[in-house]
Amino acid sequence: MKSTLIRLLLLAALLALVAWAVSLWLNRSGDASAQMPQPITEQLIDKGAYLARVGDCVACHTSHDGGKAFAGGLGIASPIGTIYSTNITPDHKTGIGAWSYGEFERAMRRGIGHDGSALYPAMPYPSYAKVSDADLQALYAYFMKGVAPVEQANKANGIAWPLSIRWPLAYWRALFSPTPETAAADALSIDDAQLQRGAYLVQGLGHCGSCHTPRALTMQEQGLDERTGSYLSGAELNGWAVPALRGMPHWSEQQIVDYLGSGRNSIAAVAGEMKDVVANSTSHMSDEDLLAMAAYLKSLEATGKGEYQHAPQRSQATIAKLTTAKDLDLGQRLYLDNCGACHFVTGQGAEQVFPRLDGASVVNAENPSALIQVILAGAMTPSTERAPSVLPMPGFAERMDDAEVAELASFLRHGWSNQASKVTAAQVREVRAALQHH
Ligand code: HEC
Ligand code: HEC
Ligand code: HEC
């Protein structure tokens, strides 16, 4: 009895040792001693600054409590605990100033840290694996010579032992993250130059899929490119519906370009976490690159999931009802009293100023949390170079109770051409509680 137990324990220890040894072998990808292959010029630094915008490095590598750009310390929630982003300024002691090009390459495209152990995929290296050598060299030039060094020690992650052991991550990476070598080969499947550029930006540095692609139980994105049908088919982020980007049948190419470039277009305005993506990243991209991304998104086959269908007759019925303002139900009355001044009885808003509610993704999303949040807390477009003025939408948390917000949201979700499920007071209560928590 006792000897069986000892044998089992020995066997388990042996297996763990083998698994650990194999993980070391898995982490031997890339060449940490590789030197920067070209001289660092002003031009290369500028190019790297642009690419850092595309990659939105600042979003994760800057803490929200007034932290210095790229100095790290932002807590990112994960199922096993909080992961803190690191200092990627060129400070020699606490940042990456002493890193070789090879070490930078391994972290960016292979998810391997300075000490040779695997990084958490909270750093989007499965997407960054697609970044070309030329672009990676420009990024290295920028982070070594274009960013101001900041001395700020990294925070220890809030993950308890044994989950904090890093070596099993090497297996996750081997299973779910492409290597730069395989990723480069995949890119060849598209032959149009503009679409190829768009795919490169969306899949690679843009890491759009990290929010717009649903994840599997083991947390990897269900597909990293168009060869998978669920790629960019919509997901959820902290209770906020993230719309599908496949084909975008409800938007023209130009509307996508305007939205990404300025935070608004003729029918919509950005809200939720996409607001920061626009402010920090896409609004700094060139028209050419925005157009390439839009063309690529339009080229994807729409999945038809939750797709909006314009229904002129139903739209007219809602408009007639609100215009005559007779026998209104509670939701309709609340709309006329509180919302109609800006979004109009047509639900069409005003071009470039007030977004359209008829057909808006946030109104029609299966999960109404984002819609409830906008009604309670309001929203504001970011100020961008292309559209400096901000457009505020007031919050109504003080003016409406849970039942009223539920009636109003239910009206929006089946008014005009919209066709989504009803909202309950309990759903509103939940979102209100979460907002107060923050
Ligand atoms: C979605 C969030 C996110 C984005 C975007 C992001 N990072 Fe990271 N990055 C992280 C996190 C979190 C870590 C720490 C991972 C860990 O500890 O395992 C990290 C780690 C790193 C490391 C390793 C640093 C070290 O000290 O080990 C480097 C280098 C790095 N990131 C560079 C970049 C660059 C350059 C960009 C932009 C092109 C970028 N990151 C964008 C979240 C992000
Ligand atoms: C941090 C998460 C995150 C990332 C990264 C992200 N998005 Fe989004 N995106 C969102 C959310 C959330 C929304 C919903 C915004 C709203 O409700 O107003 C959204 C909305 C959009 C929309 C509007 C769709 C519609 O039907 O209304 C477009 C277009 C879009 N994103 C494109 C992109 C592209 C292109 C990228 C990559 C360059 C990207 N997103 C990266 C979270 C993200
Ligand atoms: C003073 C004008 C004004 C009033 C009143 C107003 N809104 Fe808005 N609304 C806006 C503006 C401006 C935006 C764009 C803000 C953003 O999304 O960043 C907006 C955005 C929205 C959005 C998000 C649209 C999207 O595509 O992301 C929804 C939903 C919405 N409003 C619903 C309502 C409802 C419901 C009411 C009434 C309770 C209301 N609004 C009252 C101006 C207004």
Image (spheres, rainbow, N blue to C red):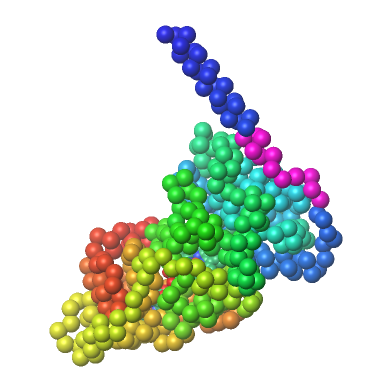
Q: Is residue 24 magenta?
A: yes
Quick check: can you spot residue 398? no
Asked whether 177 or 352 is in front, the reply is: 177
Quick check: can you spot residue 168? yes
Quarter of the figure with the C terminus: bottom left
Q: Which residues are magenta?
A: 23-35
Residue at 47% x, 71% y is 247
Is residue 161 positioned above or below 202 on the image? above
* Residue 40 placement, left or right of 56: right
Predominant SS of the magenta segment = loop
Residue at 64% x, 51% y is 182
Asked whether 274 or 213 is in front, the reply is: 213
Quarter of the figure with the N terminus: top left
* Residue 11 placement, left or right of 318: right
Q: Position of residue 164 (x, y in %)?
A: 54, 37
Q: Is residue 416 magenta?
A: no
Q: Position of residue 194 (x, y in %)?
A: 63, 73
* Residue 250 placement, left or right of 153: left
Q: Position of residue 431 (x, y in %)?
A: 33, 61
Residue at 48% x, 80% y is 252
Q: Position of residue 148 (x, y in %)?
A: 73, 61
Is residue 378 positioned above or below 316 on the image? above
